[in-house]
């Protein structure tokens, strides 16, 4: 297993924290005896496509919940575009869009109504809400189902509606927790294209995923969390260089498994012999 | 071999485990669940034994043919109830869910016997068996008659299970549809209001004219064509000594039971292998007005509050749980006022004055159910709402407008009716203003309890498990806190009520000109003060509120 630098060296100390799109300092969450997130220090630059990786139970969703203001941290600070999420929650929320892991949408609103409702919540002018809603429905392929209630939507449709609601106000930062989980390749492609378009226009995307191929294809930088601690962070190239003294063609999956300490060996069932 | 004993044993083991797990599974609310189950069991046993005693006494001691006529009515009622009730209740018992067994190499007979045996391990079945036992006891005038009735009850049970399972499975697609589920929730809420009227039915059943109907065999000519009626006819024939005819009558329900089980099996098998072709209803693209309209309300109410108001209005229409809550909030005061009026109908007119005074207060207090847990009513969607940069005061105003609007409409409907009935025209305006004042206080206090004592509102369930928000999984402490909030609301509303009641009581109604506006001003101060206080704390308490509502 390759040894990675300790986390302190990953904290970008240079520059003003408010220059970063997402900046966390010593972000910690303790549930009883369990330290779910342990002094997480992250700095995501504006316009980056940042992938947040980790095995199940590593603390990804807990971290994101603290970053978006849904779970009060035990200690630590979170800044989104320079605004403290826990000191100025309303101001911070105007700057971000969130696609949570568990979509708790208003199921008894139609897709169109929900997106428009989100627009009004973000204070977007009514005419813009109407125009952007129609455009989003068109691009996301939801036009024919826009007047169905969300309760009747498939997982992919729900994710698309939630994404539309999260980006309608042109946020500076978008947090996406497992956006590609449980959706078909077509919807996945649409979402990917929209996210790439957003980053090209300066929006920062912070997203967690288990799907290494997607992360590898989309992300400009990656952070890997394991047991609540950030164990690696950098561009794919940097990670590859650090991880692959012996293998320069290592995939992100190889790097990931290496970093979290899983040995790449075959597991055979004895009774299949 | 059609049935492997070993597989059948494991099917029964599965059912037994699932039955036990209902009582013993670990997790949140386990103690509450056990207490609830125990109370349900005691309730079930009391009801079952009460009905059993009634059935035993009527079938044993009523003279023929009235006793057999009672048997027709009892078994037919059980039959209809047993088929209809699961449709409203519809939550597939895991042990009876054959789709989960579809991947295993089980024969049709194994599945059928497994299912029949499994039904014996179900709480409602225990109640049913007690009832059927009372029929056997009632008709067991001799040993052969006891044995024949026992056989008849086994046949009845067999065909009852077969038919109910077939109907349930055949209607599965309809039952699982959202519209039917919504309807089921509303039906149960409405049925809960029929308790008062049930007394008339029981009075009718206990009357001598009903006994005459029994003696004239009014019901059996029709009911005998139901499978339950055929079983009754068999018992009647055996009781009269016509054993052959009795057995012949029993063959029919037995055959019906087999046919129903076969059909049920076929429907299940078809359902398992059929492609899930959903009728794709083509939605015509239409421009729905999702943007707040520019009406007077839209101009007066700030944007976010208006969006919350519109959203909540849509939810009242579309979410059956909230619709049910609204129905209860409307029906309760109507019910209370109508019953009060009927009771004081022959009394001196002085009492009618109180109807005018208490009508607005009753309406305001019933709004408590709408207001005390306004954030809890968002359920899991509260997470989404809290992701928006929503100003707390606007959130509370949006929600308050809904409750206030409902209360105002109720006032404007109920008060004129009460005024017309009692002829107290001079009290209309004071009562209306007092009502508005009381609603303001209730809604304001609701804001505080919503922010400081938020409660989880149970998710939509079917049938008798329907919750309309009065129950909480949050434990006794929160229940006590919300009780405290209710008491605080009543105490704070008291000055408004007294401001209207005392001048009337002391025949100094000129004071109303002073006390009623003062009451309104007092309520506005309370509303604004409490809402500002709650609003200021709302943002800081968001994680705690989410924890309470969504966990």
Image (cartoon, coloured by chain):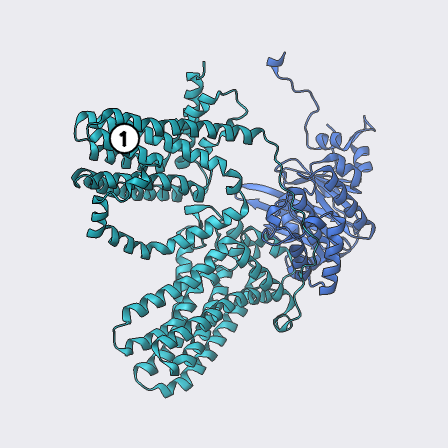
Packing grade of label 1 (10 A; few <14, some 14-19, many >=20) is many
The quadrant of the image that shows the N terminus of chain B is: top left
Work out whether residue B143 or residue A69 is closer to the camera in this orientation and state it. B143
Work out whether residue B435 or residue B444 is closer to the camera in this orientation and state it. B435
How many labels sit on residues? Answer: 1
Chain letter tied to blue? A
**Farthest residue, direction bottom:** B510
The answer to whether residue A37 is visible is yes
Whether residue B466 sits left or right of residue A256 in the image: it is left
Work out whether residue B220 or residue A246 is closer to the camera in this orientation and state it. B220
Rendered residue at 31%/54% (across/down): B198
Rendered residue at 62%/40% (across/down): B278
Q: x and y percent of residue A212 in the render? A: 73, 35
Q: Quadrant of residue A207?
A: top right
Q: x and y percent of residue A200 in the render? A: 83, 49
Name the tint of chain B in the rendering: cyan
Query: Disc 1 marks which residue?
Result: B234
Q: Is residue B420 above or below residue A219?
A: below
Q: x and y percent of residue A75 in the render? A: 61, 51
Q: Chain of mark 1?
A: B
The answer to whether residue A171 is visible is no
Q: Is residue A43 above or below residue B351?
A: above
Whether residue A229 sits left or right of residue B372 in the image: it is right
Q: Is residue B369 above or below residue B76?
A: below
Q: x and y percent of residue A186 in the render? A: 74, 39
Element carrying mark 1 = helix
């Amino acid at each position: 297993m390759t040894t990675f630098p300790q986390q302190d060296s990953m904290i970008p100390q240079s520059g003003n924290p408010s220059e970063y799109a997402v900046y966390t300092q010593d972000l910690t969450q303790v549930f009883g005896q369990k330290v779910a997130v342990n002094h997480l220090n992250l700095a995501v630059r504006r316009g980056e496509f940042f992938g947040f990786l980790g095995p199940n139970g590593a603390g990804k969703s807990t971290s994101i919940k603290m970053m978006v203001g849904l779970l009060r941290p035990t200690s630590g600070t979170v800044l989104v575009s320079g605004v403290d999420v826990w000191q100025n929650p309303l101001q911070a929320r105007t700057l971000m869009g969130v696609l949570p892991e568990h979509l708790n949408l208003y199921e008894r609103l139609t897709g169109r109504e929900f997106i428009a409702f989100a627009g009004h919540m973000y204070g977007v002018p009514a005419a813009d809400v109407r125009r952007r809603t129609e455009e989003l429905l068109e691009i996301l392929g939801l036009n024919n189902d826009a007047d169905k209630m969300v309760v009747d939507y498939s997982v992919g449709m729900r994710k698309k509606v939630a994404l539309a609601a999260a980006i309608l106000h042109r946020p500076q930062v978008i947090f996406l927790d497992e956006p590609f989980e449980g959706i078909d390749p077509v919807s996945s492609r649409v979402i990917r294209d929209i996210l790439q378009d957003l980053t090209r226009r300066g929006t920062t995307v912070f997203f967690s995923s288990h799907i290494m191929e997607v992360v590898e294809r989309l992300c400009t930088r990656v952070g890997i969390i394991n047991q609540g601690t950030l164990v690696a962070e950098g561009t794919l190239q940097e990670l590859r260089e650090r991880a692959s003294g012996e293998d320069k063609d290592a995939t992100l999956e190889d790097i990931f498994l290496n970093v979290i300490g899983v040995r790449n060996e075959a597991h055979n069932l004895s009774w299949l012999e | 071999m059609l049935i492997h004993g070993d597989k059948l044993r494991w099917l029964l083991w599965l059912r037994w485990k699932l039955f036990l797990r209902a009582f013993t599974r670990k997790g949140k609310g386990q103690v509450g669940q056990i207490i609830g189950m125990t109370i349900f069991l005691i309730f079930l046993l009391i009801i079952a034994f009460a009905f059993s005693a009634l059935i035993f006494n009527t079938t044993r001691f009523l003279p023929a043919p009235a006793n057999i006529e009672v048997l027709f009515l009892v078994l037919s009622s059980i039959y209809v109830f047993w088929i209809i009730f699961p449709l409203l209740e519809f939550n597939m018992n895991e042990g009876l869910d054959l789709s989960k067994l579809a991947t295993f190499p089980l024969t049709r007979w194994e599945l059928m016997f497994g299912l029949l045996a499994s039904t014996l391990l179900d709480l409602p079945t225990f109640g049913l068996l007690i009832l059927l036992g009372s029929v056997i006891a009632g008709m067991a005038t001799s040993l052969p008659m006891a044995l024949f009735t026992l056989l008849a009850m086994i046949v009845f049970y067999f065909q009852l299970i077969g038919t109910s399972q077939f109907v349930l499975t055949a209607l599965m697609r309809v039952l699982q549809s959202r519209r039917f589920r919504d309807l089921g929730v509303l039906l149960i809420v409405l049925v809960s209001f029929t308790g008062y009227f049930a007394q008339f039915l029981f009075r009718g059943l206990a009357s001598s004219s009903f006994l005459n109907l029994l003696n004239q065999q009014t019901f059996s000519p029709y009911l005998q064509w139901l499978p339950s009626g055929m079983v009754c006819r068999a018992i009647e024939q055996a009781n009269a000594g016509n054993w052959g005819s009795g057995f012949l009558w029993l063959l029919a329900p037995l055959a019906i039971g087999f046919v129903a089980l076969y059909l049920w099996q076929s429907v299940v098998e078809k359902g398992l292998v059929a492609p899930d072709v959903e009728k794709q209803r083509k939605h015509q693209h239409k421009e729905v007005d999702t943007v707040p309209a520019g009406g007077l309300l839209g101009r007066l109410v700030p944007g976010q509050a208006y969006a919350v108001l519109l959203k909540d209005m849509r939810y009242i229409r579309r979410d059956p749980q909230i619709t049910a809550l609204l129905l209860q909030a409307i029906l309760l005061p109507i019910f209370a006022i109508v019953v009060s009026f009927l009771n004081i109908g022959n009394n001196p007119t002085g009492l009618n004055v109180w109807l005018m005074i208490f009508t607005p207060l009753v309406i305001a207090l019933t709004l408590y159910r709408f207001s005390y847990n306004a954030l809890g009513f968002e359920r899991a969607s509260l997470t989404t709402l809290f992701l928006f940069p929503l100003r707390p005061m606007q959130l509370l105003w949006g929600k308050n407008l809904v409750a206030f609007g409902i209360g105002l409409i109720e006032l404007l409907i109920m008060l004129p009716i009460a005024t017309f009935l009692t002829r107290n025209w001079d009290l209309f305006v004071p009562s209306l203003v007092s009502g508005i004042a009381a609603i303001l206080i209730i809604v304001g206090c609701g804001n505080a309890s919503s922010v400081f004592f938020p409660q989880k509102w149970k998710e939509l369930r079917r049938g008798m498990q329907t919750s309309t928000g009065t129950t909480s999984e949050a434990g006794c402490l929160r229940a006590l806190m919300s009780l405290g909030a209710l008491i605080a609301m009543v105490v704070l509303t008291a000055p408004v009520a007294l401001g209207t009641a005392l001048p009337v009581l002391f025949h100094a109604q000129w004071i109303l000109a002073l006390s009623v506006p003062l009451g309104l001003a007092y309520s506005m101060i309370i509303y604004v003060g409490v809402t500002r206080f709650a609003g200021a704390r709302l943002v800081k308490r968001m994680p705690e509120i989410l924890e309470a509502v969504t966990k």
